[in-house]
Amino acid sequence: MSTTFDAVVIGMGQAGPSLAARLCAHGMKVAIAERDQFGGTCVNNGCTPTKAMVAGAYAAHLAMRAAQYGVVLPGSPTVSMERVKSRTDEIVRNAREGVESWMAGLKSATIYRGQARFSGPRSVEVNGEVLTADKIFINVGGRPLIPRMPGLDAVPYLTSVSMMDLDFVPEHLLVIGGSYVGLEFAQIFRRFGSRVTVVEMGPRLVGHEDEDVSRCIEDFLSGEGIALRLGAQCVSMHSAVDGLSVGLDCKEGAPREAGSHVLLAVGRTPNTDDLGLGAAQVKTDPHGYIEVDEGLLTSNPHVWALGDCNGKGAFTHTAYNDYEIVADNLLAGAARKYTDRIPVYALFTDPPLGRLGMNEAAIKKAGTQALVGKLPMTRVARAREKGETQGFLKVYVEKGSKRILGASLVGVGADESVQSLIDAVYASTPYTDFQRHVRIHPTVSELLPTVLEDLRPLE
């Protein structure tokens, strides 16, 4: 059986639902294909549940520090993982059902539940039914990468997906990978009561960030009792009577670390291997990411790829921006390009990291003459008042044009305050103009102009 549509949208992650709704509003007949849960990674096992857990971990941490604020609690605070999980599951369920209900309410859309696979350049098969369309959009996201690691097949392991199923606190969690996913889970479960060790192959955590950013993050995680094993070049897994252990080849520390559970957080891989892309003549790179042009069109002129599967961003906000680019180009005659967006993201540890634009390595690689300003969070009134003074604010500007190039903010509210710089970066606003804008006191953002008062050459 074959049915013809104006468009087929494969995958209901962050780009898919909004695109399907806008195409329907434009009068198009749309087929929606989803093999698993509506909402994709963000809603089901990414942003939504992890940030709910971050909130719980922050509450636990704050309760332990209550006396510092003059608040006396009866007894020692305890964590109920069952209640943490129940709260998280409810938030996720509401979000997922909201997306599914939204899609089901689209009058000119038909939902197909099952694996979609290309059967030709303009056709997709789902559960034996062929869906044909002149426009097909792929929004299938990604999944945790399972690395080739000696002994991994002999031990049970967790990923960012299966971590969502835990209703207990691991005795000793070994986290393989010292970047965003691994560090967020490491701090969450340390604050819930686990002993935690982070194993990182590189010489420092979040190695693609500036070195002072990495060192700051290492300091506050170590300060909470998280053990860091850096420079672990040869990692292997071993089963043990009372759990498991990880073999390490580090310059410092014991050659083996024993634990009760291990989390693999070493990256992600796109969900493109079972789409039958060859039948559609859609090209991928060696890592499986779908190759696209600046407007996100694939090698097939009838197929677009959006979100994590195209390798042009690994965030919810970049996936949503992909939707905006594709929809505006198709329906409004725009000429938008993904290359026009400026990188902005956050690491949601506590305190968080807010990142925008270029960092030191990118500036030096571009050969740009730059200035840098830096201010410790101890100078920020809001941070002192909250009793959270770890971190710093750092902003880069171009020497000649005075435009803001980027920022690395580590500290309380950094994930929000970094956004006050976004418009200035997009508009190439001279930092001298940015300094004239009045901000609310007491906030973290109000100190950004102060950071720019004492600039020094970046060497």
Image: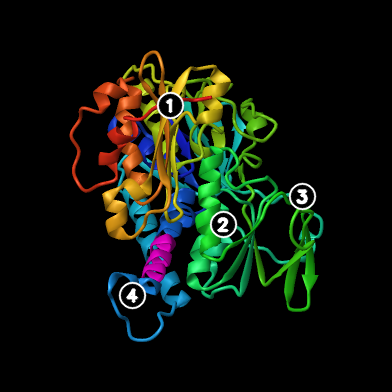
Residue behind mark 1: 456
- Quadrant for the N terminus, please: top right
Label 4, residues with CA under 10 Å away: few <14, some 14-19, many ≥20: few
Front position among marks 4 and 3: 4
Position in image of residue 66 (x %, y %) = 33, 73
- How far apart, in angstroms, are the residues tagged by discs 3 and 2? 17 Å
Position in image of residue 260 (x %, y %) = 67, 72
Amino acid at the residue labelled 4 = Ala
Q: Earlier in the sequence, mark 4 or mark 3?
A: 4
Please report the bounds of the magenta region as a residue range.
Answer: 52-62
Q: Earlier in the sequence, mark 4 or mark 2?
A: 4
104 or 356, nearer to the observer? 356
| SS of the residue under disc 3 | loop
Point out the residue furthest to the top here: 400
Label 3, residues with CA under 10 Å away: few <14, some 14-19, many ≥20: few
Residue behind mark 2: 160
Q: In this view, does 106 lie to the left or right of 224?
A: left
Position in image of residue 67 (x %, y %) = 33, 75
The residue under the point 43% across, 63% down is 53
Magenta span includes 53: yes
Q: Which of marks 3 and 2 is nearer the N terminus?
A: 3
Label 1 close to label 4 by CB (< 8 Å):
no
Position in image of residue 108 (x %, y %) = 33, 39
